[in-house]
Amino acid sequence: MDSLRKSAAQAATESNGPASGIRKSTAKKREAIVRSAAKLFLERGYDSVSINEIIAVVGGSKETIYSNFGSKAKLFEAVVQQLCSDVTIRIDTRPVGTLEEQATRMARSFVSMVLSPQIMSFHRLVTSIGREFPEAGRLFYRTGPETVYRIFSEWIALQQKNGHVRADKDPRQLGILLHDMLIGEQILSWLTSAAGEKDRARRINQTVELAVSVFLNGCAVNADSMRAASSITHARPPRRVRSRRPKTSKK
């Protein structure tokens, strides 16, 4: 018991000690560099921003950038991770309220963030440099869409375990389906500037309400029995086969 107390006390001391303060300071400085660089990259593009221009904004020297990131490419990868995290960390999966309330809250928290002007600019940037910078594209997919799929699928798996959602389908595939229902058409319309800013909130609400409704109805626990009953009701009745009397021979 004494050893456990000593270990806990030591851990508490280390978490509040000088080393911890240095780590926190370094992390804050690193994040400040990443966010400043992100703003430049989103405004001007990856190729048009130099290390010197980043330094002019964040301060310090080239040594500061290279000691924290190693290169401009690695700094951009840190930007990708940060902006993807800004989206995924906002997804609200709290198991509070009815199933519809939970799904609506989760969907809206995701869509409102992923369709924000900053993240839309980020999408355009990653798409534009995908061929020349495939590592960044793959990193974006892993830390962005793949993470959202996992978050959605974990929520769905919990609902399946609790008996609220049909359990005969793969939760990951259902998570991908929900993701695409929420942003498939929306993200294309804003990426191509086909949608205006003034109706953003209204369109998000309409999409969320419709997607959640269709998804939950399709994943309802009694969906299979309803479909089976419907197929039986609408099935064509079997044709009657008339029995033929055997012919009697005339004598």
Image: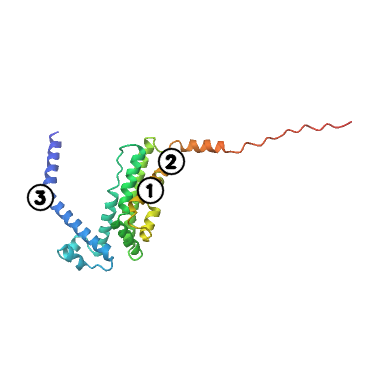
What amino acid is found at the position of numbered circle 3 in the picture?
Answer: Pro
Q: Mark 2 points at which residue?
A: 217
Q: Residue 206 carries which label?
A: 1
SS for tag 3? Answer: helix
Is residue 72 placed above or below 10 in the rendered structure?
below
Left or right: where 213 falls relative to 3: right
Q: Distance between the residues labelled 2 and 3?
A: 55 Å
185 sits to left or right of 74: right
Q: SS at mark 1?
A: helix
Q: Does residue 204 appear to the left or right of 22 in the view shown?
A: right
* Amino acid type assigned to the residue bearing label 2 in the image: Asn
**Mark 2 or mark 3, which has the lower sequence index?**
3
Q: Position of residue 76 (x, y in %)?
A: 26, 61
- Give the residue at the far right of this rendering: 251
Question: Given this view, does label 1 or label 3 mark the residue nearer the observer?
Answer: 1
Q: CA separation, marks 1 and 3?
A: 51 Å
